Image: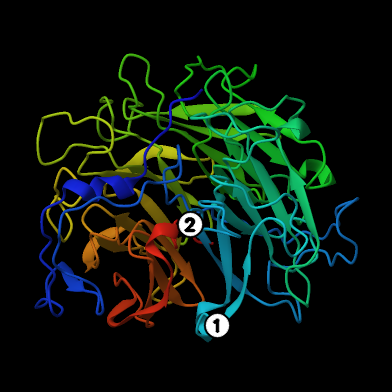
Amino acid sequence: MSVSRTSALLAVAVATPVVAFASLLAPSPASAVAVPGTAPGTVPGAVPAAVPGAVPGAVPGAVPGAVPGAVPGAVPGAVPGAVPGAAKGCPSFVAVASPYATVNGKARAGSVTLYGSARNGLKPVKTLHQGADGIGGAPEVNDSFGSAVARGDFNGDGCGDLAIGVSEEFFGARVLDADGHGVVHILFGSPGGLTTVRSVDVTHLGRRHGTDRFGAALAAGDLDGDGDDELIVGAPGMKGGGGVGVFGMSRRSPYGTGTLITQATKWVHQGQGQTDLFGEALATGDFNRDGKAEIAIGAPGDGGEKASSGVVTIVDLRKRHAKAYTQNTGGVLGAVEKWDDFGATLATGDFNADGRDDLAIGVPGEDVSSKLTRGMDYGDGAVNVLYGSAGGLTTARSEMWTQSILAGTPRYYDRFGASLATGDLNGDKDDELIVGAPGEGAVQVIAGTRTGGLTRNHNLLLTGDRTGAFGSAVLAEGGKLLVASPGSGRLTVVGTKVKKGSYPGAVPGTARVVRTGDPDDLYGYALS
């Protein structure tokens, strides 16, 4: 049995009140504002237990391909080279996961609710679960359908597809108190919505089922430049310290035989530890602008003698090349410390509009306000940023963001960096960085600029429902900022406006709770 990780939601159980500001502060380098409709005060109390072993918030960033090419064996009717959801007649959608939803009387079986684009008001489309709409299996207790979700165009037809992780699914009898085997369902898009369904599991990687938690993390990106996205699946519980499966390379079927990457893979050159959690977080990005994305793999439990200090590995599967980063890597700010969880979350975006993706690395266990090392799910939190270059990611001008230099006050329970997302919120063609701090019940927006990347100027702190873990998952979609509070079952949408330069784009006065679910379901645990 692998060691399970508790989510950042648990950090709010010991939190103290967060001050919520009624309006924007006077002009300053940073502002904080309360989100309407949330509870600014805090009543300490337990939050529903998180999905076993999961750390919320690594929002996969798909890198849609644009090079014509169809995938042999994929769903018929492929149209080469289109962006997911952009083909004529293909509806855009947002997926909101509730991995602890009760389905057909089965507690924590899990469900995923589909909505139309946030641009059009997040209108409900349907709720998905196993055993319906062509999705295999049946709802079972503790399956956690929706432990991860990722959008991409896996068959190159220009319609957005959806991958859904079911990390606690068992094949055969469930083993008491053990992590799940896991499975991933792929729903292919069409002008009529998500229709055809296929599934992959660890046997597609040539392995037998184990307590792998296959599907605990998902990402999508065009790794080979053939015009469709590959599906990347994390299996952090896999024997030996975790693993990652890649499906759809070289125009293979996205639900056929995949490629397995582990720390023991010959060209990865890393030692293994059973609790490393290699594959707990995933992202893809084209860091050198060659038209082909690389994979960023988080192993927040790795660290040798510095338990759970964390390691992030950048993998170029085409070239069979891997490079590991820690806070002891030259040029990376910070220092390797126990329980930092470097790499617990990952997100890619272009913060300086140079055409190359940059990488944000969540370090939610980082201690900032005290030199006292607090274990497990405590931590003020930080985010390390590495920028892309012609040679790939570089540490030459790396950054480390904490609330000691941003709006807000770092506290040992904040877990700043427990969720990450990127997107152009202010319309100036560079991405902003969105950072969740669910222990504080807050989200920070850091503006990107063409003159140097991310800047603290005008950074914005949105505070919300801390007992509901506001900020546990974040997403930029349809010109809006979406913020989930799984502990209270709320989904908040924040509008944006065009204001080029070092401005966050998000407009706090537009924030409103638009959808709600049962708090026991962990509604909003993952967004895509």
The Cα atoms of the two marked residues, 2 and 1, are separated by 18 Å
Q: Please name the residue shown 43% across and 26% down the image.
A: 3
Q: Nearer the viewer, residue 120 or 333?
A: 120
Secondary-structure class at tag 2: loop
Q: Please name the residue shown 34% across and 48% down the image.
A: 418
Secondary-structure class at tag 1: loop
Crowdedness of circle 2 by 10 Å Cα count: few (<14), some, many (20+)? many
Residue 344 in percent (x, y) is at: 40, 39
Q: Please name the residue shown 9% across and 78% down the image.
A: 26
Query: Which residue, given by chain and number where applicable, does mark 1 sit on?
Result: 123
Tell me whether circle 2 and circle 1 mark residues in contact (CB < 8 Å): no
Residue 340 vertical placement versus 398 (above, below)? above
Q: In this orientation, does residue 288 appear?
A: no
Q: Quadrant of residue 7?
A: top left
Q: In the image as oriented, which residue stretches furthest toward the front?
A: 105
Q: Quadrant of residue 170?
A: top right
Indicate the amino acid at tag 2: Ala
Indicate the amino acid at tag 1: Lys
In the picture, measured across the screen, residue 331 lies left or right of residue 367, that is right
Q: In this orientation, does residue 411 appear?
A: yes
In the picture, measured across the screen, residue 469 lies left or right of residue 152, that is left
Q: Nearer the viewer, residue 487 or 204?
A: 487
Residue 443 in percent (x, y) is at: 29, 62
Q: Quadrant of residue 450?
A: bottom left
> Residue 526 has which mark?
2
